[in-house]
Amino acid sequence: MTEAKPVRVAVVYGGRSSEHSVSCISAGAIMAHLDPAKYEVLPIGITQEGTWTQGTREGLDIVDGRLPEVELQDELALSLNPSTRGRIHNVTRHEHYAEVDVIMPVLHGPYGEDGTVQGLFELSGIPYVGAGVLASAAGMDKEFAKKLLVAEGLPVAPQVVLSGETALDEEQKERLGLPVFVKPARGGSSIGVSKVASWEDFGAAVKLAYESDDKVLVEPEIIGAEVEVGVLEHPDGSLQASVPAQLLGTTDSDEGFYDFDAKYIDEGVSAQIPAPLGEGRSAEIRQRAVEAFRALGAAGLSRVDFFVTEDAYFINEINTFPGFTPISMYPQVFAAVGVSYEELLDTLIQTALARG
């Protein structure tokens, strides 16, 4: 009996995003945990300028506070001809580089998690892990994600959207109260996010957010637990929600919230898994996470973030490709229900191949 050949997986990481380094860290962890007996891994990096190039499996972690980034080597390009799907060309040397069966786009933020690269994969005809064009674009834009969630009757917190404006009117200030969170509408990893306790500091926070996006969200602080639920799609199309995780120590950082350093560098935030919500509340939140996944038309995986108070809960956002570093919450919540990191990756790739 002929032994099955390993599936050729291109792990694409980096990209033109403020979350470039987070992508590198996630990709390094993923490549280290893919079963070599089942998968032949091809690392492909995207530089901060947007050039596809040969990737590496080494040096993709944080060393002495230094964040990793993709270094340009030869330029690569994916074939957009469906009849030669999966072929990758070395543009610099004018020669064939590799051929793959499926792509895992470990990309966070603009030009990676927002539907743009997913459109590229659709044109090429190559199977890929994660959400498609529409769900990726909607999930990346927190304004439109919330509109879709509201349309499905799911609870979300109030928000004010700024497009060029730098101040709120008195009615908006009254409705939101203080403190507020100011954030880029299409950002992630808490980059460009500020907590504002005085309206005198609002202008500086808006300016910071506009450095990452031309649309800014202003949201009220909700006093309650920060809870995260993972959703995983299996090859047969069934959806599995993880147990909820309650983040601990999220206000202990210098910024007073779950910021970039807390997520990826300091390791100062831990989680209680499962969250102490009670069986009924926990089941309800898990169901809402699945409904949010379906509301966006997501695929493969998502992490749904909630604020939970004593008498209510709100969906804060949905991440269509959540962080996949060793300390990221998505792998942790599935480990708590018996799905190992390796099994998680296997399921994601097999689901992508089943979807075609």
Image (cartoon, rainbow, N blue to C red):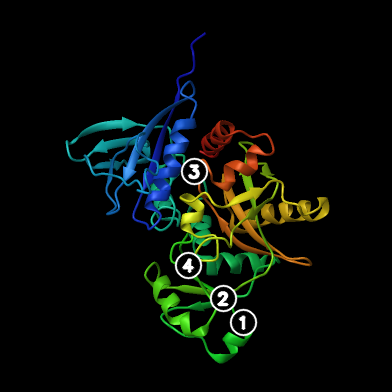
Amino acid at pointer 3: Thr
Sequence-first disc among 4 and 2: 2
Mark 1 → mark 2, Cα distance in angstroms:
7 Å
Q: Are marks 1 and 2 in contact (CB under 8 Å)?
A: yes
Mark 4 → mark 2, Cα distance in angstroms:
11 Å
Q: Residues within 10 Å of mark 2 (few under 14, many from 20)?
A: many
Mark 4 → mark 1, Cα distance in angstroms:
17 Å
Mark 2 → mark 3, Cα distance in angstroms:
29 Å
* Numbered disc 2: secondary structure: strand
Residue 190 rendering spot, x and y as whole percentages: 48, 61
Q: Is residue 65 left or right of residue 130?
A: left
Sequence-first disc among 4 and 3: 4
Residue 8 rendering spot, x and y as whole percentages: 42, 29
At 38% from the left and 58% from the top, the residue drawn is 18
Q: Which residue is identified by label 2?
A: 180
Amino acid at pointer 2: Val
Q: Quadrant of residue 300?
A: top right
Q: Are marks 1 and 3 in contact (CB under 8 Å)?
A: no
Q: Which residue is identified by label 4?
A: 193
Q: Which residue is identified by label 3?
A: 325
Q: Is residue 137 left or right of residue 275?
A: left
At 47% from the left and 57% from the top, the residue drawn is 260
Amino acid at pointer 1: Gly
Q: Is residue 256 visible?
A: yes
